[in-house]
């Protein structure tokens, strides 16, 4: 089967030849903007205000559509996924995960799925904290479990570790869990349900934060995850059939993954990169809301900033890599191309918020420089309306209690942080700075992890903020 290079890591193919044309285009665009502002400042200002209004209104409508769809009753599901259970290879990339790996191995051992159909490959990615020794002890007595130890000089990063493990995979479906995740006993069964549709190449489950009590940041991240899955992911699935592959608690057909060349080692958001390549090949991604696992949220602002910066930097790069192949694809319908484009640019919207506030501030501080700042200040509610609707809808679906609402008063602070880190990510990319994958710090050990995982599995709408 032919495989266009655009569907297999296009950044690698274009990197050598694209830098000069891109620089020229950026310079030309900057000169055009400067000329427009100098010659017709009022027109340029009004054009920018109109464009920003259109963008924010579009994303607000998108949030409204997703919220409406997500609030509809969950459709009934079939009892079985396929005529026969699928064989599965679980891949677990591990780099210095001694603090959390025992919880995952216990959860994997408790999965309610035929043991002879499960193969588990733990990848010890050059750990220096004893993770490898813990894994060697964990696999004893478990048929089909093994440890792959990567060489000290191996290429680092999650994608490279997963690609090494993919060579060993014998299952029909590859399932990925990060080391801090703990799947509920029925997670695997639920995750495989959508594969009854032969068009589905990958499936994403629902991840729930199990340590919201560790800090205020962790509590806010827990609500963010809740709303992201119960509203955004559910809405994309029900409206467009375009949920994304999320990188953990997810599954992909082994033959499709190999057809696509595995994970992109040059991407720091390999999950988003793989989502686009799956769509471009004409396959579908499913969403299994009842396939629940729990994970650890970051607990400090520094860790939160670094994690979200990586997401923004990687997502923006995926946008640059795939926006043109996306619109040239004959396999996607127009509405799917529009939604995929909005998905690709989601980490650019906070940058536009910075631009809008910056222009409004300048025109307010320097009267007469440009027309009244009124139009830009007037669209400020559009910036916040979408996220507010998503958070409110998620809490509504979850049947939130009053105490769950109090931390939301600090969500504007996280939104400001998001604007800053997304802007920095874009500026760093434009400046040509290099960025390598950085593992998220593990800062919490939760003695009640199994309780939280069981609770989340019993109620797929649960807000995991322990009583």
Image (spheres, helix red, strand yellow):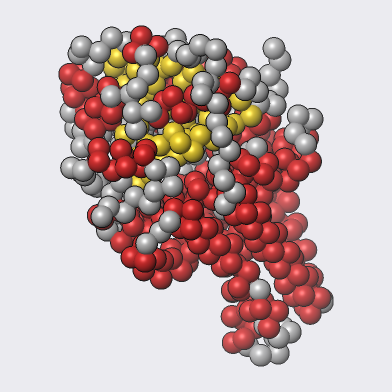
Residue at x-position 23% and y-position 16%:
139
User: Image point 46% across, 20% down: which residue?
Assistant: 174
**Image quadrant containing the N terminus:** top right
Is any part of residue 266 visible from this angle? no
Q: Position of residue 177 (x, y in %)?
A: 38, 30
In this picture, residue 17 sits left or right of residue 358:
right
Name which quarter of the figure residue 196 lies in: top right
x, y (%) of residue 144?
32, 10
Taking depth in this image into account, of 72 and 10 the one nearest to the observer is: 72
Quadrant in the picture for residue 257: top right
Q: How many marks?
A: 0
467 relative to 11 in the view: left or right: left
Q: Is residue 442 visible?
A: yes
Whole-percent x and y of residue 291? Answer: 44, 33
Q: Would you place residue 171 above or below residue 11 in this image? A: above
Is 87 on the left-hand or right-hand side of 330? left
**Residue at point 55%, 26% (across, down):** 78
Along the line of sight, which residue is nearer the eye, 420 or 32?
420
Q: Look at the image and tell me in which quarter the C terminus lies.
A: bottom left
Q: Which x, y percent locates residue 143?
A: 28, 9
């Amino acid at each position: 089967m032919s495989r266009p290079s655009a569907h297999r890591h296009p950044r690698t193919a274009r990197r050598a030849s694209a830098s000069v044309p891109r620089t020229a285009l950026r310079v030309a665009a900057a000169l055009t903007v400067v000329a427009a502002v100098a010659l017709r400042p009022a027109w340029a200002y009004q054009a920018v205000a109109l464009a920003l209004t259109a963008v924010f209104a579009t994303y607000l409508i998108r949030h409204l559509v997703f919220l409406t769809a997500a609030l509809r009753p969950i459709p009934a599901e079939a009892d079985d996924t396929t005529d026969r259970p699928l064989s599965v290879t679980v891949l677990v990339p591990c780099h210095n995960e001694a603090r959390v790996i025992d919880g995952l191995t216990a959860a994997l051992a408790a999965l309610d799925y035929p043991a002879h159909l499960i193969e588990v490959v733990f990848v010890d990615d050059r750990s220096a904290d004893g993770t490898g020794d813990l894994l060697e002890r964990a696999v004893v007595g478990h048929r089909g479990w093994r440890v792959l130890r990567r060489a000290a000089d191996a290429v680092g990063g999650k994608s490279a570790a997963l690609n090494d493990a993919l060579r060993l995979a014998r299952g029909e479906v590859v399932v990925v869990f990060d080391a801090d995740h703990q799947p509920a006993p029925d997670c695997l069964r639920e995750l495989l349900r959508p594969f009854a549709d032969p068009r589905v190449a990958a499936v994403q489950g629902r991840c729930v934060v199990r340590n919201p009590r560790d800090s205020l940041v962790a509590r806010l991240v827990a609500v963010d995850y809740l709303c992201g899955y119960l509203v955004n992911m559910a809405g994309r699935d029900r409206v467009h059939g375009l949920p994304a592959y999320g990188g953990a608690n997810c599954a992909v057909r082994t033959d499709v993954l190999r057809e696509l060349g595995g994970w992109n080692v040059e991407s720091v958001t390999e999950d988003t990169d793989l989502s686009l390549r799956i769509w471009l090949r004409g396959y579908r991604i499913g969403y299994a809301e009842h396939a629940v696992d729990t994970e650890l949220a970051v607990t400090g602002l520094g860790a939160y900033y670094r994690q979200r910066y990586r997401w923004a930097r990687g997502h923006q790069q995926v946008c640059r890599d795939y926006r043109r192949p996306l619109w040239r694809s004959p396999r996607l319908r127009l509405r799917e191309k529009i939604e995929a484009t909005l998905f690709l640019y989601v980490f650019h919207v906070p940058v536009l918020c910075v631009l809008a506030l910056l222009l409004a501030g300048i025109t307010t501080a320097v009267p007469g420089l440009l027309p009244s700042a009124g139009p830009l200040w007037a669209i400020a509610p559009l910036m916040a309306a979408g996220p507010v609707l998503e958070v409110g809808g998620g809490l509504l679906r979850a049947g939130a209690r009053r105490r769950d609402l109090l931390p939301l008063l600090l969500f504007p602070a996280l939104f400001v942080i998001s604007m800053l880190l997304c802007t920095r990510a874009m500026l760093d990319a434009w400046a040509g700075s290099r960025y390598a994958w950085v593992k998220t710090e593990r800062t919490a050990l939760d003695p009640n992890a199994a309780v939280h995982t069981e609770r989340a599995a019993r109620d797929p709408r649960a807000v995991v903020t322990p009583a």
